[in-house]
Image: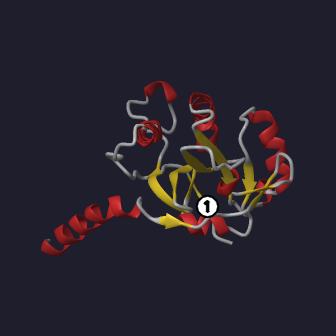
Amino acid sequence: MKKNIVFLLTLTCLQPLMAQVLVQDFKLTNVANNEWVSMANFQSCSGYAIIFTSNACPYDEYYRDRIKTLVNAYQGKIQFILINSHPDPEENTNAMKAAYQTWNIPVPYLADKDQQAMDCFAARKSPECFLVKSEAGKYRILYSGALDDNPQAAQQVTDSYLKRAIEALLANQAIAQPSNRAAGCAIRKK
């Protein structure tokens, strides 16, 4: 029993540190226009909301309108980037492009089929988001996890984790809850 308590306390104490990790930039192809995109392309923004997503996961579909609302609310302040790391056939770049055209979300949708970005961010779910800030050319994860507390019913959301983290970033305040468990479909490793 004592070992379990120590383990849980250690895990709880480490969780905020996990969200303060430095990550490397990536360079991936945007399926919307076949151009290379990296975080360095968007130097004038205050931060980046990197969201690992999918064409086929039902959880991603539940969140599509919520993501669009956030993109519109923080346009010009936070650069949103969607990344698809799923290796499944229905997630190929042609399917990604077709799905993206129906979403009407004006942000890059990047193909990460070698799972470079997924490994860099340690992303495991879809959707899973990471709020990143550039500091002297280095990229620090300030928040990681779920977008909010209700993956299936937008009208029943009581806590918008990503929105709250973005507001803290823009106000230059510490993020009270730097990580949450993402709920969604597992991203299968290649």
Please state which of residues 185 and 181 is positioned toward the viewer in this rendering.
181
Q: Quadrant of residue 4?
A: bottom left
Residue lying at the far bottom of the rendered structure: 3
Q: Quadrant of residue 99?
A: top right
Find residue 93 and report its horizontal and vertical position in percent: 83, 55
Residue lying at the far front of the rendered structure: 136
Q: Residue at x 72, y 47 (%)?
A: 55
Q: Is residue 57 visible?
A: no
In this view, 106 is above or below 112: above
Q: Residue at x 56, y 46 (%)?
A: 49
Please state which of residues 189 and 16 is positioned toward the viewer in this rendering.
16
Applied colour scheme: secondary structure
Quadrant housing the C terminus: bottom right
In this view, 93 is above or below 74: below
Q: Residue at x 56, y 62 (%)?
A: 137
In this view, 19 is above or below 167: below
Judged left or right of residue 123, residue 39 is right
Label 1: few (<14), some (14–19) or many (≥20) C-alpha neighbours in 10 Å: many
Judged left or right of residue 122, residue 169 is left
Identify residue type, mark 1.
Ile
Question: Which residue is tagged 1?
Answer: 187
Q: Quadrant of residue 165?
A: top left
Find residue 189 and report its horizontal and vertical position in percent: 64, 70
